[in-house]
């Protein structure tokens, strides 16, 4: 075989290989696009059964057999297929704040206002407020992370009276409401990763800095104030991770902290700034 023939044959084989590769890529792209379109149509059909109509801009349909989250005309819904119910999220700006696609801040708490459509009186009927047949129930949802870094709900869920309770001291006990919170925790990050909602990221402070307790005993509370329920106590020289710092209405500084409890895992709450010092104790 001459050198020219060898060269021509090589070019033909190269062109054939490139054609095969491009065909395969196109096929994968086509299948992916087809699957995405089918998921959007299925999500739209499922939502319509609950009276929600409109363009589904994004959804997690197909990710979880128990349900999915969807953005319909700019409003965020969560459809619980397990219990055949739907809720809208009424405070998305707060819910998705500081949650990016990488979950870079390892968010550990959501205070989510679920407006459950056509809800029935149950064990949690006293929480939140009723708007006709719709039940607005705010949930204080602590989250943890498994060994693979996946977000999972902690054991405790809280609520309170009114749309925006001053205290979240009531335990959520109705199973279908627990299921809703679990579904939310499992779907919220995939929803963000698909572009379902873009939350506002605040500057890091103090970037998960260390701190320690200076008082003999101090409460860690659900919110930044002495009237909030205590989640437990710290003792002098206990180490914590500082997540945030604010000035409360009474003028006191409060730190949002997290710490690891052997019984409950990671716990997140607020401690009066008078009893914390930033940095490591030497």
Image (cartoon, rainbow, N blue to C red):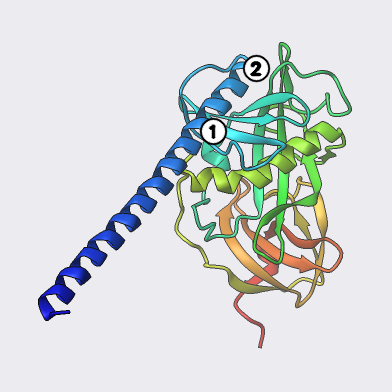
Quadrant (top left, top right, bottom left, bottom right) of the N terminus: bottom left
Q: Residues within 10 Å of mark 2 (few under 14, many from 20)?
A: some
The residue at the point 63 percent across, 35 percent down is: 68
Dot 1: within a 10 Å radius of its alpha carbon, few (fewer than 14), some, or many (20 or more) residues? some
Q: Is residue 129 among what the camera can see?
A: yes
Image coords of residue 124 (percent x, y): 84, 29
**Residue 117 horizontal side relative to residue 170, left or right:** left
Q: Is residue 201 above or below residue 48?
A: below
Q: Residue 50 has which mark?
A: 2
Reply above or below: 11 against 38: below
Q: Residue at x 60, y 44 (%)?
A: 188
List the residue tagged with mark 1.
Answer: 39
Query: Which quadrant of the figure contains the C terminus?
Result: bottom right
Instruction: Tell me what residue is drawn at x 57 percent, y 18 percent.
Output: 52
The answer for how far apart the CA atoms under marks 1 and 2 are is 17 Å
Q: Residue furthest top?
A: 132
User: In this view, which residue lies farthest toward the front?
Assistant: 1
User: Would residue 161 appear left or right of 24 to someone viewing this image?
Assistant: right
Q: Nearer the viewer, mark 1 or mark 2?
A: 1
Give the percent coordinates (x, y) of residue 134. 70, 17
| Mark 1 / mark 2, whichever is N-terminal | 1
Asked if residue 166 can be seen in this view, the reply is: no
Q: Quadrant of residue 4?
A: bottom left
Q: Position of residue 192 (x, y in %)?
A: 51, 45
């Amino acid at each position: 075989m001459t050198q020219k023939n060898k060269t021509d044959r090589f070019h033909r084989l190269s062109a054939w290989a490139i054609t095969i590769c491009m065909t395969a890529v196109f096929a994968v792209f086509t299948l992916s696009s087809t699957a995405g379109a089918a998921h959007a149509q299925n999500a739209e059909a499922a939502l319509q059964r609950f009276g929600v109509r409109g363009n589904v801009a994004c959804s997690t349909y197909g990710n979880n057999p128990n349900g999915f989250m969807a953005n319909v005309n700019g409003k965020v819904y969560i459809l619980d297929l397990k219990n055949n119910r739907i809720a809208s999220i009424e405070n998305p700006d707060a819910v998705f704040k500081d949650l990016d696609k990488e979950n870079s801040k390892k968010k550990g708490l959501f205070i989510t206002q679920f407006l459950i459509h056509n809800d029935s009186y149950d064990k949690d009927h006293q929480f939140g407020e009723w708007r006709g047949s719709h039940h607005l129930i705010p949930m204080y949802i602590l989250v943890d992370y498994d060994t693979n870094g996946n977000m999972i709900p902690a054991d405790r869920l809280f609520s309170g009276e009114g749309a925006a309770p001053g205290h979240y001291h009531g335990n959520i006990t109705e199973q279908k409401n627990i299921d809703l919170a679990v579904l939310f925790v499992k779907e919220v990050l995939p929803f963000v990763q698909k572009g379902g909602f873009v939350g506002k990221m605040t500057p890091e402070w103090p970037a998960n800095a260390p701190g320690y307790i200076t008082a003999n005993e101090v409460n860690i509370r659900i919110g930044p104030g002495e009237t909030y329920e205590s989640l437990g106590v710290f003792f002098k020289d206990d180490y914590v991770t500082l997540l945030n710092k604010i000035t409360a209405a009474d003028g006191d500084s409060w730190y949002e902290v997290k710490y690891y409890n052997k019984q409950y895992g990671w716990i997140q709450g607020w401690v009066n700034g008078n009893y914390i010092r930033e940095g490591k104790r030497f």
